[in-house]
């Protein structure tokens, strides 16, 4: 009986040690993963800032569309010249620093033979009608400078786009182009910069802030790993003293 009673605590300590090692391994791996995410996020922020502040380059044409991805092109400052198709304007619900309202997306027929959707900027609900902002309609050739953005398919948070009802919650390039009968639209859109003349739509409201809590998460996981180690050592020490 004595031998059996002795083995039972040992088995319990062995099991505790295995669980402690597993916990330390899991928490440490999660911490390392968050450190990797931290460096990825810092690199992303640096790339975005460099692209957004650089001199504008020509918007990608059809020959370059297959290579347009978020990683390679998003937030790159681009320029394009053409004429707005004001009769094909689309309003997409938006919440900005100016409150709730709509993004005004208007196709621009470029002088290079393709069409690109331009997010001309924000309008409040009382300015959703083109009649309320006649000064903002441009019906001559114009040059647009802004940030290249990738399409936002599907819809917004818990809200799907409804082309049949002309209700849009995200800037889904393919769906908007199809609804407006645009057959040669680029697979991206452009967030236009603010117009020097002011007025509506209000451009230049692209948000370039990215949440970066990875360091906090990493420290949390590493702290949990240390707590598991400390707890295991405390139990082992207590058992050693008890037996002594």
Image (cartoon, rainbow, N blue to C red):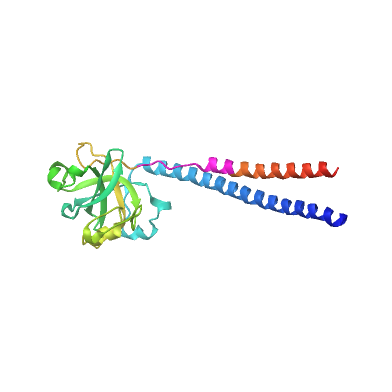
Q: Residue at x 13, y 43 (%)?
A: 132
Q: Is residue 217 magenta?
A: yes
Residue 37 visible in image:
yes
Tell which of 241 and 201 is nearer to you. Answer: 241
Instruction: Judge from the rendering whether residue 220 lies leftward or rightward of residue 88; answer left or right.
Output: right
Q: Residue at x 18, y 46 (%)?
A: 128
Tell which of 67 and 5 is nearer to you. Answer: 5
Q: Quadrant of the N terminus?
A: bottom right
Residue 151 visible in image:
no
Rendered view: 133 above or below 85 = above
**Residue 198: horizontal and vertical position, in percent?**
21, 36
Extreme-right residue of the structure: 2
Question: Image quarter for residue 200?
Answer: top left
Instruction: Judge from the rendering whether residue 228 lies leftward or rightward of residue 68; answer left or right.
Output: right
**Residue 222: horizontal and vertical position, in percent?**
62, 43
Question: Image quarter for residue 96?
Answer: top left
Instruction: Judge from the rendering whether residue 41 lies leftward or rightward of residue 170; answer left or right.
Output: right
Rendered view: 228 above or below 12 = above
Q: Quadrant of the C terminus?
A: top right
**Residue 160: horizontal and vertical position, in percent?**
31, 57
Magenta stretch?
207-220
Q: Residue at x 28, y 40 (%)?
A: 99
């Amino acid at each position: 009986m004595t031998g059996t009673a002795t083995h039972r605590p040992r088995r319990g300590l062995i099991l505790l040690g295995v669980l402690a090692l597993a916990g330390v391994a899991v928490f440490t791996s999660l911490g390392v993963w968050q450190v990797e995410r931290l460096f990825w996020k810092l690199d992303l922020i640096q790339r975005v800032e460099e692209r957004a502040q650089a001199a504008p380059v020509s918007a990608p044409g059809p020959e370059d569309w297959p290579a347009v991805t978020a990683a390679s092109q998003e937030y790159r400052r681009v320029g394009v010249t053409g004429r707005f198709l004001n009769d094909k304007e689309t309003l997409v619900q938006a919440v900005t620093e100016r409150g709730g309202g709509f993004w005004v997306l208007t196709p621009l027929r470029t002088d290079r033979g393709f069409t690109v959707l331009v997010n001309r900027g924000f309008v409040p609900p009382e300015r959703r009608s083109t009649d309320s902002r006649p000064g903002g309609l441009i019906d001559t050739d114009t040059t647009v400078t802004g940030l290249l953005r990738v399409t936002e398919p599907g819809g917004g948070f818990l809200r799907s786009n409804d082309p049949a009802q002309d209700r849009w919650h995200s800037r889904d390039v393919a769906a908007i182009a199809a609804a407006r009968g645009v057959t040669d639209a680029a697979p991206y859109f452009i967030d236009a910069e603010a117009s020097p003349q002011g007025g509506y739509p209000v451009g230049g409201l692209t948000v370039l802030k990215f949440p970066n809590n990875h360091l906090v998460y990493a420290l949390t996981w590493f702290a949990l790993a240390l707590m598991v180690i400390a707890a295991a050592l405390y139990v082992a020490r207590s058992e050693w003293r008890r037996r002594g």
